[in-house]
Image (cartoon, helix red, strand yellow):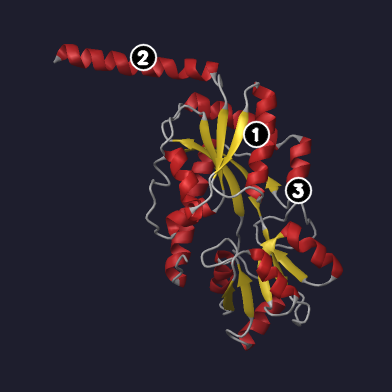
Amino acid sequence: MNALLLRGLAAALAMTALAPAAALDYPARPIRIVVPVAAGGGNDIAARLIAQKLTAAWGEQVVVDNRPGAATAIGSEIVAHASPDGYTIMLVSVSFAVNAALGRKLPYDSLKDFAPVTQVARVPLILLVHPSLPVKSVAELIALAKTKPGQLNYASAGNASSTHLPMELLMSLAYVSFNHVPYKGTAPGLNDLLAGQVQLMFDAIPPALPHMQTGRVRALAITSAQRSAALPDMPTIAEAGVPGYAYDSWFAIFAPARTPAAIIDKLNREIVRIVHEPDIRDRFVQMGVDPLGTTSAQLGAHVRSEIARWTKVVRERNIHAE
């Protein structure tokens, strides 16, 4: 028995000693960044920008592998079950936390099966109204809504989507009621806002900006706690009349749980450096994205906080996924 224990201890010590050595050799072959949505979206673009820079920096090919489906659960499962060696990582958005908050039966544990690397960026949304609505501020919108409870229609990309939840949060904090009109994506919702079929919605900055400039929609405020680099003169919703309001979508990178800390640290240092390179920062701002680059510990705390917050909103507002 003592011999078995000694052999087990020796094996464990050997593995511990190998972890820093593995990090010194890392990367020694191509790396895959799984993106659990279809190509073309903001998180896909962010992953490709990072992949190109990592390839140039490390001399090993870094490829983006789009694995859409099951509200991002398919791609996330691939990474949860991948070898914890740093060669399969993923870039996800706020839907990663929302899936856990919705109580979906997931083939992984959102907190236990992943090692946080860094929060790459935050993605504020912008509150838009049709110009026929007689409001020019968030405070005026809330005052109007209180005189017409449930009569103003808002568009979203569907139940529990990243444009539905922030409106539910706004209604909860401002004590108002809007009528939810879910669409299959934000584009058809924006089309109906332009046509006056709905009166308000949240959307990302880039698709809204041309219509803001021509006056076809009116922008009232952004959702984040801080002003956006893309629209520095636009107030936040909290500044404009709803204290405590804050919502961001976000991009973050995770590796499988049990990935050696030395590899996580190496990934973190390089990706944070990339995010703050001038050309990447400029591209992010053009996308309506605010670059961040946090520590691994900060991302871990952020995800736990996000899951707790959206679990509370989902329960209080009786939100169900489609």
Q: Residue at x 63, y 29 (%)?
A: 270
Tell whether label 2 touches label 3 (CB within 8 Å). no
Looking at the image, residue 263 lies above or below residue 108: above
Say which quarter of the image contains residue 80. top left
Residue that mark 2 sits on? 14
Whichever of labels 3 and 2 marks the residue nearer the N terminus, that label is 2
Looking at the image, residue 130 lies above or below residue 306: below
Question: Residue 246, image x and y in percent?
Answer: 61, 60
> How far apart in space, not on screen, are marks 1 and 3 (Cα)?
18 Å
Looking at the image, residue 240 lies above or below residue 252: below
**SS category of the residue bearing label 3:** helix
Q: Is residue 10 toward the left or the right of residue 106 in the image?
A: left
**SS category of the residue bearing label 2:** helix
> How far apart in space, not on screen, are marks 2 and 1 (Cα)?
32 Å
Residue that mark 1 sits on? 51
Residue that mark 3 sits on? 285
